[in-house]
Image: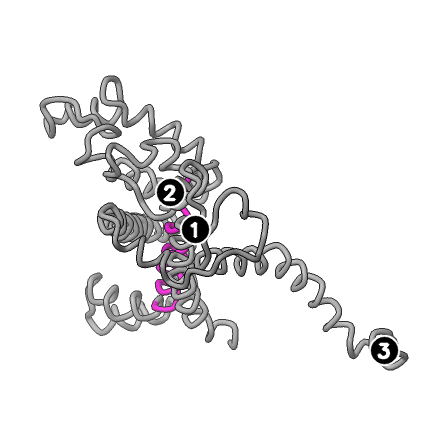
Amino acid sequence: MRKILTSLTDGRGFDIGLVSLPLGFLFLMSGLPLIYNVLMSFQEVDMFSLGSFIRPFVGFKNYETLFSQRETWPILGNTALFVVASILGQFVIGFSLALFFWVNFPGASWLRGLFLVSWVMPGLVVGAIWNWILSGDFGVLNYMLRETGIISSNIFWRSDPDFSLWAVIIANVWLGTSFNMILLSVGLSGIPKDLYEAAELDGANVWQRFWTITLPMMRSTIGAIISLGLIFTLQQFDLFAAITSGGPNNSSNVTQYWAWDLSFRQYDFAQGATISVIMIVFVMFASIVYVRSTRHEVRG
Protein backbone atom coordinates (compact mmCIF):
# COMPACT_ATOMS: atom_id res chain seq x y z
CA MET A 1 0.00 0.00 0.00
CA ARG A 2 2.88 2.35 0.82
CA LYS A 3 4.41 1.74 -2.63
CA ILE A 4 1.14 2.67 -4.31
CA LEU A 5 0.86 5.90 -2.31
CA THR A 6 4.52 6.71 -2.97
CA SER A 7 4.10 6.20 -6.72
CA LEU A 8 1.17 8.58 -6.71
CA THR A 9 2.99 11.26 -4.78
CA ASP A 10 6.28 11.14 -6.69
CA GLY A 11 4.50 11.34 -10.08
CA ARG A 12 5.33 7.91 -11.50
CA GLY A 13 1.82 6.52 -11.00
CA PHE A 14 -0.10 9.77 -11.26
CA ASP A 15 -0.71 9.37 -14.99
CA ILE A 16 -2.16 5.89 -14.44
CA GLY A 17 -4.48 7.17 -11.74
CA LEU A 18 -5.48 10.11 -13.92
CA VAL A 19 -6.41 7.85 -16.85
CA SER A 20 -8.13 5.21 -14.73
CA LEU A 21 -10.91 7.57 -13.62
CA PRO A 22 -12.25 8.45 -17.11
CA LEU A 23 -11.71 4.87 -18.27
CA GLY A 24 -13.75 3.60 -15.32
CA PHE A 25 -16.49 6.12 -16.04
CA LEU A 26 -16.47 5.19 -19.74
CA PHE A 27 -16.72 1.48 -18.93
CA LEU A 28 -19.56 2.10 -16.47
CA MET A 29 -21.61 4.32 -18.77
CA SER A 30 -20.81 2.72 -22.16
CA GLY A 31 -19.09 -0.62 -21.66
CA LEU A 32 -21.66 -2.22 -19.37
CA PRO A 33 -24.68 -1.19 -21.52
CA LEU A 34 -22.83 -2.55 -24.57
CA ILE A 35 -22.18 -5.89 -22.84
CA TYR A 36 -25.78 -5.98 -21.64
CA ASN A 37 -27.05 -5.34 -25.19
CA VAL A 38 -24.87 -8.08 -26.70
CA LEU A 39 -25.94 -10.52 -23.99
CA MET A 40 -29.60 -9.68 -24.55
CA SER A 41 -29.33 -10.56 -28.25
CA PHE A 42 -28.62 -14.18 -27.25
CA GLN A 43 -31.44 -14.43 -24.72
CA GLU A 44 -35.21 -14.60 -24.59
CA VAL A 45 -36.30 -11.23 -23.22
CA ASP A 46 -39.68 -9.81 -22.23
CA MET A 47 -40.79 -6.86 -20.13
CA PHE A 48 -40.75 -8.90 -16.93
CA SER A 49 -37.15 -10.09 -17.33
CA LEU A 50 -35.72 -6.89 -18.83
CA GLY A 51 -33.94 -5.85 -15.65
CA SER A 52 -32.20 -9.18 -15.08
CA PHE A 53 -29.01 -10.67 -16.53
CA ILE A 54 -30.21 -14.23 -15.95
CA ARG A 55 -32.67 -15.14 -18.71
CA PRO A 56 -33.28 -18.16 -20.96
CA PHE A 57 -30.35 -18.54 -23.39
CA VAL A 58 -31.49 -19.10 -26.99
CA GLY A 59 -28.18 -18.94 -28.86
CA PHE A 60 -28.46 -17.55 -32.38
CA LYS A 61 -32.23 -17.94 -32.51
CA ASN A 62 -32.82 -14.18 -32.42
CA TYR A 63 -30.46 -13.72 -35.38
CA GLU A 64 -32.13 -16.53 -37.32
CA THR A 65 -35.55 -15.05 -36.63
CA LEU A 66 -34.39 -11.61 -37.67
CA PHE A 67 -33.03 -12.70 -41.04
CA SER A 68 -36.07 -14.89 -41.73
CA GLN A 69 -38.47 -11.95 -41.56
CA ARG A 70 -39.50 -10.59 -44.94
CA GLU A 71 -39.02 -6.94 -43.95
CA THR A 72 -35.40 -7.44 -42.84
CA TRP A 73 -33.69 -7.39 -46.23
CA PRO A 74 -35.63 -4.38 -47.60
CA ILE A 75 -34.75 -2.44 -44.44
CA LEU A 76 -31.10 -3.46 -44.74
CA GLY A 77 -31.22 -2.30 -48.36
CA ASN A 78 -32.71 1.03 -47.25
CA THR A 79 -29.93 1.37 -44.70
CA ALA A 80 -27.23 0.70 -47.30
CA LEU A 81 -28.78 3.21 -49.71
CA PHE A 82 -29.17 5.79 -46.95
CA VAL A 83 -25.56 5.40 -45.81
CA VAL A 84 -23.98 5.43 -49.29
CA ALA A 85 -26.10 8.30 -50.65
CA SER A 86 -25.66 10.39 -47.51
CA ILE A 87 -21.89 9.94 -47.31
CA LEU A 88 -21.44 10.52 -51.04
CA GLY A 89 -23.65 13.62 -51.06
CA GLN A 90 -22.04 15.10 -47.95
CA PHE A 91 -18.54 14.43 -49.25
CA VAL A 92 -19.04 15.76 -52.80
CA ILE A 93 -20.83 18.93 -51.71
CA GLY A 94 -18.53 19.43 -48.73
CA PHE A 95 -15.41 19.00 -50.87
CA SER A 96 -16.76 21.41 -53.47
CA LEU A 97 -17.43 24.03 -50.79
CA ALA A 98 -14.00 23.44 -49.23
CA LEU A 99 -12.33 24.04 -52.60
CA PHE A 100 -14.51 27.10 -53.16
CA PHE A 101 -13.57 28.70 -49.83
CA TRP A 102 -9.92 27.66 -50.29
CA VAL A 103 -9.60 30.54 -52.75
CA ASN A 104 -9.90 32.78 -49.66
CA PHE A 105 -11.80 35.66 -51.23
CA PRO A 106 -12.97 38.62 -49.10
CA GLY A 107 -15.65 37.50 -46.65
CA ALA A 108 -14.91 33.78 -47.13
CA SER A 109 -14.41 33.13 -43.42
CA TRP A 110 -17.74 34.76 -42.51
CA LEU A 111 -19.60 32.89 -45.23
CA ARG A 112 -17.93 29.62 -44.22
CA GLY A 113 -19.14 30.16 -40.66
CA LEU A 114 -22.75 30.41 -41.83
CA PHE A 115 -22.58 26.85 -43.12
CA LEU A 116 -21.94 25.62 -39.56
CA VAL A 117 -25.51 26.50 -38.63
CA SER A 118 -26.77 23.20 -39.98
CA TRP A 119 -24.20 21.20 -37.98
CA VAL A 120 -24.93 22.81 -34.60
CA MET A 121 -28.72 22.53 -34.92
CA PRO A 122 -30.42 19.58 -33.12
CA GLY A 123 -31.59 16.77 -35.38
CA LEU A 124 -35.24 17.15 -34.41
CA VAL A 125 -35.12 20.86 -35.28
CA VAL A 126 -33.56 20.03 -38.65
CA GLY A 127 -36.28 17.41 -39.18
CA ALA A 128 -39.01 19.95 -38.39
CA ILE A 129 -37.52 22.46 -40.84
CA TRP A 130 -37.28 19.88 -43.59
CA ASN A 131 -40.84 18.77 -42.85
CA TRP A 132 -41.96 22.20 -44.02
CA ILE A 133 -39.54 22.27 -46.96
CA LEU A 134 -40.63 18.80 -48.15
CA SER A 135 -44.35 19.30 -47.65
CA GLY A 136 -46.30 18.03 -50.63
CA ASP A 137 -48.85 20.87 -50.61
CA PHE A 138 -46.91 24.02 -49.72
CA GLY A 139 -43.28 22.89 -49.53
CA VAL A 140 -40.49 25.14 -50.75
CA LEU A 141 -38.75 22.31 -52.60
CA ASN A 142 -41.82 21.50 -54.69
CA TYR A 143 -42.27 25.19 -55.46
CA MET A 144 -38.68 25.54 -56.69
CA LEU A 145 -38.86 22.36 -58.79
CA ARG A 146 -42.18 23.42 -60.28
CA GLU A 147 -41.00 26.94 -61.12
CA THR A 148 -37.88 25.61 -62.86
CA GLY A 149 -39.95 23.17 -64.89
CA ILE A 150 -38.35 20.02 -63.45
CA ILE A 151 -41.71 18.69 -62.22
CA SER A 152 -45.24 19.41 -63.38
CA SER A 153 -47.10 18.33 -60.22
CA ASN A 154 -46.27 18.21 -56.54
CA ILE A 155 -44.25 15.34 -55.10
CA PHE A 156 -45.39 14.09 -51.72
CA TRP A 157 -41.92 13.41 -50.41
CA ARG A 158 -42.85 12.10 -46.98
CA SER A 159 -45.79 9.86 -47.93
CA ASP A 160 -44.77 8.54 -51.36
CA PRO A 161 -42.90 5.20 -51.01
CA ASP A 162 -40.70 6.11 -53.98
CA PHE A 163 -39.47 9.35 -52.40
CA SER A 164 -39.78 8.95 -48.61
CA LEU A 165 -36.27 7.60 -48.11
CA TRP A 166 -34.81 10.24 -50.40
CA ALA A 167 -36.54 12.91 -48.32
CA VAL A 168 -34.51 11.85 -45.28
CA ILE A 169 -31.35 11.51 -47.38
CA ILE A 170 -31.69 15.10 -48.63
CA ALA A 171 -32.13 16.36 -45.07
CA ASN A 172 -29.18 14.32 -43.81
CA VAL A 173 -26.92 15.54 -46.61
CA TRP A 174 -27.77 19.12 -45.68
CA LEU A 175 -27.12 18.33 -42.01
CA GLY A 176 -23.66 16.79 -42.52
CA THR A 177 -22.25 18.83 -45.40
CA SER A 178 -20.78 21.57 -43.20
CA PHE A 179 -18.92 19.00 -41.07
CA ASN A 180 -17.30 17.56 -44.20
CA MET A 181 -16.50 21.04 -45.47
CA ILE A 182 -14.69 22.06 -42.27
CA LEU A 183 -12.57 18.90 -42.04
CA LEU A 184 -11.71 19.01 -45.73
CA SER A 185 -10.80 22.70 -45.43
CA VAL A 186 -8.36 21.79 -42.67
CA GLY A 187 -6.86 19.09 -44.89
CA LEU A 188 -6.49 21.49 -47.80
CA SER A 189 -4.77 24.09 -45.64
CA GLY A 190 -2.10 21.52 -44.73
CA ILE A 191 -0.94 21.03 -48.32
CA PRO A 192 2.25 23.03 -49.06
CA LYS A 193 1.75 25.76 -51.65
CA ASP A 194 5.18 24.99 -53.11
CA LEU A 195 3.86 21.75 -54.62
CA TYR A 196 1.25 23.60 -56.65
CA GLU A 197 3.72 26.25 -57.76
CA ALA A 198 6.20 23.61 -58.92
CA ALA A 199 3.49 21.66 -60.75
CA GLU A 200 2.23 24.82 -62.42
CA LEU A 201 5.76 25.63 -63.61
CA ASP A 202 5.95 22.12 -65.08
CA GLY A 203 2.82 22.84 -67.12
CA ALA A 204 0.21 20.92 -65.07
CA ASN A 205 -3.33 22.25 -65.45
CA VAL A 206 -5.94 22.56 -62.70
CA TRP A 207 -7.29 19.03 -63.06
CA GLN A 208 -3.82 17.49 -63.17
CA ARG A 209 -2.83 19.33 -60.00
CA PHE A 210 -6.03 18.18 -58.32
CA TRP A 211 -5.56 14.48 -59.20
CA THR A 212 -1.81 14.32 -58.59
CA ILE A 213 -1.42 16.62 -55.57
CA THR A 214 -4.68 17.41 -53.80
CA LEU A 215 -6.26 13.95 -53.63
CA PRO A 216 -3.07 12.02 -52.73
CA MET A 217 -2.13 14.54 -50.04
CA MET A 218 -5.63 14.33 -48.52
CA ARG A 219 -5.91 10.55 -48.53
CA SER A 220 -5.83 10.24 -44.74
CA THR A 221 -8.30 13.11 -44.29
CA ILE A 222 -10.70 11.58 -46.79
CA GLY A 223 -10.45 8.19 -45.09
CA ALA A 224 -11.20 9.75 -41.71
CA ILE A 225 -14.17 11.71 -43.07
CA ILE A 226 -15.70 8.67 -44.75
CA SER A 227 -15.31 6.52 -41.63
CA LEU A 228 -16.74 9.26 -39.39
CA GLY A 229 -19.55 9.76 -41.88
CA LEU A 230 -20.38 6.06 -41.68
CA ILE A 231 -20.49 6.22 -37.88
CA PHE A 232 -22.64 9.36 -37.77
CA THR A 233 -24.99 8.13 -40.50
CA LEU A 234 -25.58 4.80 -38.78
CA GLN A 235 -26.41 6.75 -35.62
CA GLN A 236 -28.89 9.04 -37.37
CA PHE A 237 -32.28 8.63 -35.74
CA ASP A 238 -33.81 12.08 -35.25
CA LEU A 239 -34.52 12.79 -38.93
CA PHE A 240 -36.47 9.56 -39.38
CA ALA A 241 -38.49 10.24 -36.23
CA ALA A 242 -39.25 13.80 -37.34
CA ILE A 243 -39.88 13.33 -41.08
CA THR A 244 -41.21 9.88 -42.03
CA SER A 245 -41.31 7.63 -38.92
CA GLY A 246 -39.99 4.84 -41.15
CA GLY A 247 -43.05 4.84 -43.41
CA PRO A 248 -45.01 4.44 -45.44
CA ASN A 249 -44.92 0.63 -45.23
CA ASN A 250 -41.24 0.57 -44.19
CA SER A 251 -40.21 2.34 -47.40
CA SER A 252 -37.98 4.71 -45.43
CA ASN A 253 -37.23 2.45 -42.49
CA VAL A 254 -33.58 1.79 -41.58
CA THR A 255 -31.91 -0.40 -38.99
CA GLN A 256 -31.35 2.29 -36.36
CA TYR A 257 -34.99 3.38 -36.40
CA TRP A 258 -36.21 -0.22 -36.66
CA ALA A 259 -34.23 -1.22 -33.57
CA TRP A 260 -35.91 1.57 -31.59
CA ASP A 261 -39.35 0.67 -32.98
CA LEU A 262 -38.96 -3.01 -32.09
CA SER A 263 -37.70 -2.26 -28.59
CA PHE A 264 -39.88 0.61 -27.44
CA ARG A 265 -43.02 0.30 -29.54
CA GLN A 266 -43.37 -3.44 -30.08
CA TYR A 267 -41.47 -4.35 -26.87
CA ASP A 268 -39.44 -6.99 -28.70
CA PHE A 269 -36.24 -6.14 -26.85
CA ALA A 270 -34.31 -9.19 -28.03
CA GLN A 271 -34.83 -8.36 -31.71
CA GLY A 272 -34.00 -4.71 -31.10
CA ALA A 273 -30.78 -5.73 -29.35
CA THR A 274 -29.92 -8.10 -32.20
CA ILE A 275 -30.18 -5.30 -34.77
CA SER A 276 -28.07 -3.07 -32.53
CA VAL A 277 -25.31 -5.69 -32.33
CA ILE A 278 -25.22 -5.94 -36.13
CA MET A 279 -24.88 -2.14 -36.32
CA ILE A 280 -22.11 -2.20 -33.71
CA VAL A 281 -20.07 -4.46 -36.01
CA PHE A 282 -20.23 -1.90 -38.83
CA VAL A 283 -19.45 0.97 -36.45
CA MET A 284 -16.39 -0.91 -35.13
CA PHE A 285 -15.21 -1.47 -38.71
CA ALA A 286 -15.57 2.25 -39.42
CA SER A 287 -13.71 3.04 -36.19
CA ILE A 288 -10.79 0.83 -37.23
CA VAL A 289 -10.64 2.59 -40.61
CA TYR A 290 -10.66 5.96 -38.83
CA VAL A 291 -7.85 5.01 -36.46
CA ARG A 292 -5.73 3.66 -39.32
CA SER A 293 -6.38 6.80 -41.36
CA THR A 294 -5.19 9.11 -38.59
CA ARG A 295 -2.36 6.93 -37.21
CA HIS A 296 0.49 8.65 -39.05
CA GLU A 297 -0.86 12.08 -38.06
CA VAL A 298 -0.62 11.14 -34.40
CA ARG A 299 2.92 9.82 -34.86
CA GLY A 300 3.97 12.96 -36.68
- Report the mark closest to the observer, 2 or 3: 2
* Quadrant (top left/top right/bottom left/bottom right) for the N terminus: bottom right
Q: Are marks 3 and 1 in contact (CB under 8 Å)?
A: no
Q: Is residue 134 above or below residue 177?
A: above
- Badge 3 is on which residue? 10
The image quadrant of residue 215 is bottom left
Q: Which one is nearer the viewer's eye here, 254 or 104?
A: 254
Q: Is residue 116 above or below residue 222?
A: above
* Residue at x 25% of width, y 32% of height: 248
Q: Is residue 117 above or below residue 136?
A: below
Three-letter amino acid code at the position of disc 1: Ala
Specify the principal SS of the magenta part.
helix
Residue extending farthest front: 56
Residue extending farthest right: 2
Circle on res. 257: 2
Residue 224 included in the magenta stretch of the image: yes
* Residue at x 31% of width, y 65% of height: 214
Which secondary structure, mark 2?
Answer: helix
- Badge 1 is on which residue? 270
